[in-house]
Amino acid sequence: MNTLLSFALNSSISLANPDTDAKIQPAIDNQPALTVLYSGNLKGVSSERYPFPSIAQIQKGENNGQLNSMDFQQGHIAELDGWLLQVPELGLKEGIKHLKSKSLRCKSGEPISAIENPYEILLADPRGQDGLQDLLSETDSKVVQWSVALCTDQDGKTLSLIKRGRSQTMPSLTDSVIELRKSYRTQLDFGKGAFDVVSIGKPSQEFSRLYNHTKALIHRDAHIFVDAGNFVDGASSIVPHETSLHRPMAYQALANLNPSALGFGQNELIGGFQNFLSEIQPHALPYIASNWTSEKPELAIPTH
């Protein structure tokens, strides 16, 4: 089970006898806290998941004769400063280029309604929204209002951005970090005419997000960070019979988090123990294992 947990432990334990006068054993005020961060089975840089539950519901609706779908197209949506860039006619690459223009000026547009569940945001033509919401009733979906910003550059090109809820401020785009989210686009027809649907995925277990979140937590308080294993990618999906090309990046990220203790799992050992040792050697990572023994000193791992 993937997990990232944070909890506080008292670093001072009171040994006071409850039957002793409180004046003799005064309580300790403002006891210092130690934050313990524990992770496990993160599975590395390529571990992100985009479930898109709507796809299964659309296929189920087709099988039941409720609707027809056509032209499924996978793509990406850009997110910056909390705003999502809808699929622009210019194409995503050119759209992002225009978003970074210093001459860009944004103004509010008419709010829109979107269907949202824990894993995706669906934008649809209003005339098909009711049917789509009924179709997605099993996915814990609800209708949410989104703000719209219309951003125009000096060449007169206008891009539409959306943000969840009622936003009182326009996007600040020129210095924003751009993040790409997976999406798909299709057309649905419930028997009253086809309409466009765009689904924007919500990333789950995305390595960069987990890394940045952990880094922010450990710089905020006194902390201990430990990982139970399977922090890195396993086998390569590109090079046959080799380990993932992402592994060096993951080990460097792990070193940057300054862990106090580490366990190793199947992913770490997928290329063999000697390969694992050679991978971690540049980083001096504190791996321990109470159930590992070797007659060769060079293959030894501390037990604690």
Image: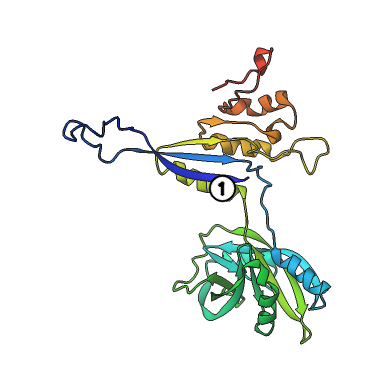
Q: Residue at x 54, y 45 (%)?
A: 4
In this rendered view, identify the residue nearer to me: 155 or 1: 1
Residue displayed at 66% across by 42% down: 43
Answer above or below: position of 37 versus 200. above
Q: Is residue 281 above or below residue 59?
A: above
Tell me the residue that label 1 is attached to. 210
- Occupied quadrant, residue 162: bottom right
Task: Pick the quarter of the image with the C terminus.
Answer: top right
Q: Position of residue 107 (x, y in %)?
A: 50, 77
Between 284 and 18, the one nearer to me in the picture:
18
Q: Quadrant of residue 219?
A: top left
Image quadrant holding the N terminus, namely top right
Q: Is residue 87 visible?
A: no
Residue at 33%, 32% in the rendered image:
13
Q: Secondary structure at mark 1?
A: helix
Q: Residue lying farthest left?
A: 23
Can you say whether 59 is above or below 293 in the image?
below
Q: In the image, 193: left or right of 121?
A: right
Residue 286 spot, x, y in % from top left: 55, 27
Question: Which residue is at the front of the view, 108 or 287?
Answer: 287
Residue lying farthest to the bottom in this orientation: 192
Q: Is residue 82 visible?
A: yes
Q: Position of residue 209 (x, y in %)?
A: 57, 50
Residue 123 in which image quadrant = bottom right
Residue 233 percent across, percent down from the top left: 69, 40
